[in-house]
Amino acid sequence: MTLPKISVTIITHNEEENIENCLKSVKWADEIVVIDSFSADKTLAICKKYKARIIKYKWLGYSKQKNLAIDNARNEWILSLDADERITKELLDEIKKEFERGDAADGYYIARKNFFLGKWIKHCGWYPDYNLRLFKKTKGRFIEREVHERAEVNGAAKYLKHPMEHYTYKTLSDFISRLDRYSTLSAMELHKKGKRAGWSHLTIRPLSTFLKMYFFKNGFLEGFYGILLSGLYAFYTFSKYAKLWEMQKKRR
């Protein structure tokens, strides 16, 4: 049978360190759509090398930007990626076999091998980390929220066996920088919903985050990486609620 055509969609802003390896992993795609928020580095030059269709657009937020990429895709199927993700040969072969069987679902959840400081983290709740990334254009959409965007499918979904690779947080400085940005966005989202931060959010919640990741999610098996990751996520939780408290204070 003829395989359905797939559009790979990617959002970018100054991703010259990541985008080439991402594009190499999807050069088989029928179309690559890049929504770029006016990158000032070599991102666009690299995208042009791989014949990606580039659309420059002001930053709307993670989910809105990804939905814009979906809207501009021309094919029946969407494979939504971040610039620091890679599709492996094993995953591509599995996708092809799934379509060849002729009973494709409306969407597919794909696991992610998340790399922290260059190490694949198998514990701390970081694996398999399934995300809906492959779906019919008419059936899938990202839920609009400030941060930690997730796609949903209006129809049947399956889980694929082979994971993609996600090369996130290459340095501690990178993690801390994004932690600051994401905690602000999370606090804003909570604030819009009318949530409030109390003393327990600044004490018990961060401790609970550390204990959950390090002990209950077996983060201790990752050695020093597990301590770092659990501690950083605990600080993320603290930062999110501290910023929410600050927003509450300003509103009075």
Image (spheres, rainbow, N blue to C red):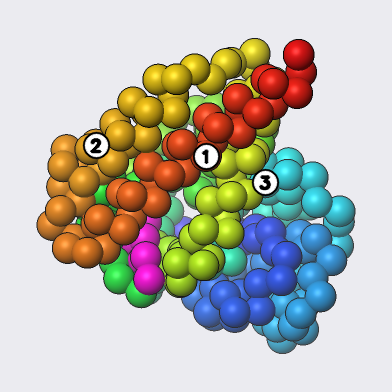
Residue closest to the eye, 227 or 166: 227
Name the one closer to the observer, 118 or 84.
Answer: 118
Question: Mark 3, mark 2: which one is toward the viewer?
Answer: 2
Percent across and percent down for residue 229 are 33, 55
Q: Name the residue under label 3.
A: 62
Looking at the image, tell me whether mark 1 or mark 2 is earlier in sequence order: 2
Single out the mark in the foreground, 3 or 1: 1
Q: Is residue 114 visible to the viewer in this orientation of the structure?
A: yes
Q: Are marks 1 and 2 in contact (CB under 8 Å)?
A: no
> Disc 1 marks which amino acid?
Ser
Quarter of the rendering containing residue 242: top right
**What whole-number distance in Å separates the C-alpha atoms at marks 3 and 1?**
20 Å
Q: Is residue 115 magenta?
A: yes
Q: In this view, does 202 lie above or below 162?
A: above
Which structural element holds mark 1?
helix
Q: Find the distance from the CA under tag 3 to the CA under tag 2.
A: 27 Å
Q: Is residue 172 above or below residue 4?
A: below
Q: What residue sits 23% from the left and 38% below the top?
A: 211
> Which residue is disc 1 drawn over?
239
State which mark lies toward you, 1 or 2: 1
Q: Mark 2 points at which residue?
A: 212
Predominant SS along the magenta part: strand
At a point 37% along the width and 42% down the height, the residue shown is 234
